[in-house]
Amino acid sequence: MPVEPERIRKLNEAPERPERWYVLYWAQMNRRVDSNHGLLYACELANRYHLPVLFYEGVTCAYEYANDRLHTFILQGVPDTVRRLQQLGIGYVFYLRKTRRSRGDILYELAQHAAAVVTDDYPTFIARHHNEHVPQQLEVAYYVVDSSCIVPMNCIPARQYAAYTIRPKINRLLPKYLNPADNPHVKQRFAAKTPDIHLEVSEADIPSLVSSSEIDHSVPPSLSFRGGRSTAEKLLRHFLQHNLGRFAEARNEPSEHATSHMSPYLHFGQISSLEIALAVQKYARDHNINADAYLEELIVRRELAFNYARHVEEPGDLKNLPAWCQENMQKHAGDKRDPAYTAEQMERAETYDELWNATQKEMLLRGKIHGYYRMYWGKKIIEWSPTYEEAAKLMIDLHGRYALDGRDPNTYTNILWCFGLHDRPWPERSIFGKMRFLSLEGMKRKTDARAYIEEIRALEREREDVTKVV
């Protein structure tokens, strides 16, 4: 069936050009074949004009925070994509821009032969920048398609200020959109010669490709997560079979490992929230499990984050906070921070707080912090930073550089939640004012902090062993 029109926006006035060679799908954020409405719409257009589809994926050295960890995770997904596209008869081009002196105009070259360009509608990071600036430079129709949210962002046109306001809107629309996406189908297989700029990527080549790129080599690949569609599917199966039934009661206990670990794969688009939600629903139904707690986080909370990012200019800007938060920060801006740490000290996990240091080290080593402890991590950065603005900047930069699920609508929303976004006022205290406060004593009372700290120490030893081998 056709892609829902609510998912599609045309961002320029240029026409479709059916006399050209193919329809171009540009995978900026949704780097997958299955359950990808952008690719499906490209196939629709191609079938209308009896043309093939060319799937273009690139990785550049020039994006902010480019480093070994992020490059490796993306490249690990390429072989899965190639295999699936070959089966479908869809063409594929992968371009790795290794240095800033290398060509940066590949999209424009490919678009010259395209009947239309279709890409991802995404409200943050490099895709947002591209979608604001590229369309007007093309002489061919440029469409963006929302394949990140289950309920398309366009269906909720106004900014929502809390989960309780967006929840009924989403729940009312879910029956229409919570249905499997079609499999891509093209009438015309891609039979042309692959462009010379295409790079074949094999698993064995990835370390050398990364090391030869002009990026930050100080951030090594994650110790715990590898990229790729196959890995995402394997993790999802493990979550369904072992953790979904205990998620509601164990999700806030990091030592229980009851979460799905889907956030890196969702961020890089190697799996979709729609696929996850349908799989969770089916497994829960078949095994008589209540999955409401997980679906609330996956759908309502995640899509609240996308709604927020869609409706503000700079998602990480504290100016987007509600009025009570602004007044609160003005009132407590001069409160004394004691102790106070520099950004460098916090980045290196050099504080008096053993638990907080462990959360920061998890970010450094795994590229992801457990969600419950990440709230504590953010609150302490507010407590120790000279200003609220510096605290927010540090949280954004640390996620941008180290986190596999950083640079994402959820990232910005979770960070600003620490300052009061999508929250409510609490009893007043120093530095935080009416912001919610989380204490070390509370974390120790509610979670097995010691088990978590020991786990991160073991992870540190693992990193030391890997470094010695290298």
Image (tube, rainbow, N blue to C red):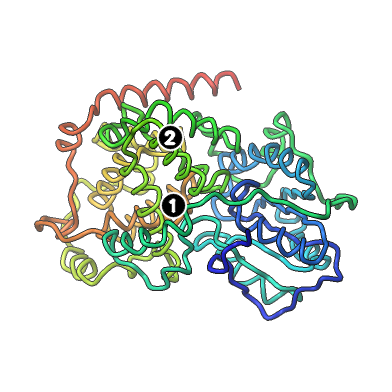
Q: Position of residue 216 (x, y in %)?
A: 58, 44
Left or right side of 152 for 45: right
What residue is shown with label 2? 283
Q: Residue at x 48, y 24 (%)?
A: 463
SS label for mark 2: helix
Q: Nearer the viewer, residue 290 or 392?
A: 290
Q: Position of residue 40 (x, y in %)?
A: 66, 56
Residue type at mark 2? Tyr
Residue type at mark 1? Asp
Q: Residue at x 18, y 56 (%)?
A: 432
Q: Are marks 2 and 1 in contact (CB under 8 Å)?
A: no
Q: Which mark is residue 49?
A: none
Where does the N terminus fall, quadrant-wise? bottom right
Count neighbours of disc 2 (C-alpha within 10 A) and say few if under 14, some if 14 to 19, many if 20 or more.
Answer: some
- On the question of residue 403 being in view, the answer is no
Q: Which mark is residue 397?
A: 1
Left or right side of 178 for 271: right
Q: Residue at x 59, y 39 (%)?
A: 73
Q: Position of residue 178 (x, y in %)?
A: 47, 53
Where does the C terminus fall, quadrant-wise? top right
